[in-house]
Amino acid sequence: MTSLTLVRRIKARPSIVFDAVTTAEGIAQWWGPDAGPVLLAEADVRVGGRYRVRFGMLDGTEHESSGEYLELVRPERVAISWRWKGGQEDPGVSRVEIRLRAIPEGTELTFTHALLHDDDARRSHEHGWTGALNKLEAHFAGSTTTP
Amino acid sequence: MNNQERLGRTFSALVDPTRRAILARLERSDGASVSELAQPFAIHLPAVMKHLDVLADAGLVTRSKSGRTVTVRLRPQPMREAMDWLRRYERFWSNRLDRLAVYAEAKEAEARRKGR
């Protein structure tokens, strides 16, 4: 079941974006939080290979996520499994997928982070339950049980 | 059921357009009977009952019986957890994708300078 989708238009060709996503050098540049450093970036970039990224926050805490490369089609698509180390707040494995499409100004990147992978669910998602969710959210924002 | 399974159940329940319409209908009122809920849809009552089972399993609705009438009510907690999950990751990734774009664009400029 797909749950989060983000789209970005980037002024760089797909092969450059793909390498920025998949190389340890690239990951070290963008994976960490704004002002905190990426402390470790390892990537064995092949299907079945593992990656591990640790980063620090300004409050001194360190976080690590790791997983496996599930799909790699340069320069079109990368899918990885995702798990927080020690993940108290979000245990379990989810799936992150990045799709790249060439457009005149460079690349359109479509990012999804899904709890479970299910194509039917994704199709349905593309037909827009986000809008429905937003409407319902207005209701819950006014709910008395809000902490 | 752990947190992850619960979230998965919530999202799965929300995937279906009829179930979303039922939730939207419940959002506008303080409870509705099963036949009231079935009324706008071109589907039979048993199909509506099945959708309500899925929503109830996900904890998104409660059903209470009084005499011959079953009243269905919205239960917001699982939806709130799902929204929290979405928001947390949306912040996390938006930020990173912005920086990925900046980095890739710098790499593109560098490649062009080198005539590639």
Image (cartoon, rainbow, N blue to C red):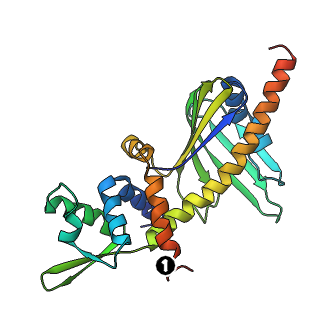
Give me the chain letter of mark 1: A
Q: Amino acid at mark 1?
A: Ser
The x, y position of residue B29, in whole percent, is 34, 76
Quadrant (top left/top right/bottom left/bottom right) for the N terminus of chain B: bottom left
Position above or below: B79 against A43 = below
Q: Nearer the viewer, residue B60 or A95?
A: B60
Residue visible at 76% across and 32% down?
Answer: B104
Q: Is residue B78 left or right of residue A146?
A: left
Tell me the residue at 83%/54% (across/down).
A36
Q: Is residue B4 above or below residue A49?
A: below
**Residue B12 vs residue A107: left or right?**
left
Front position in the image: B87 or A70: B87
Against B26, residue A58 (above or below) is above
A60 and B79: which one is in front? B79
Q: How many marks?
A: 1
Residue hosting label 1: A143
- Residue drawn where x is 43% and y is 64% of the image: B6
Place residue B12 in its image quadrant: bottom left
Furthest-right residue in view? B113
Badge 1: how crowded within 10 Å, few (<14), some, or many (20+)?
few
Q: Residue furthest bottom?
A: B67
Relative to residue B89, is residue A119 depicted above or below? above
Q: Is residue B4 visible?
A: no
Q: Quadrant of residue A16?
A: top right
Percent across and percent down for residue A119 are: 40, 40
SS for callout 1: loop
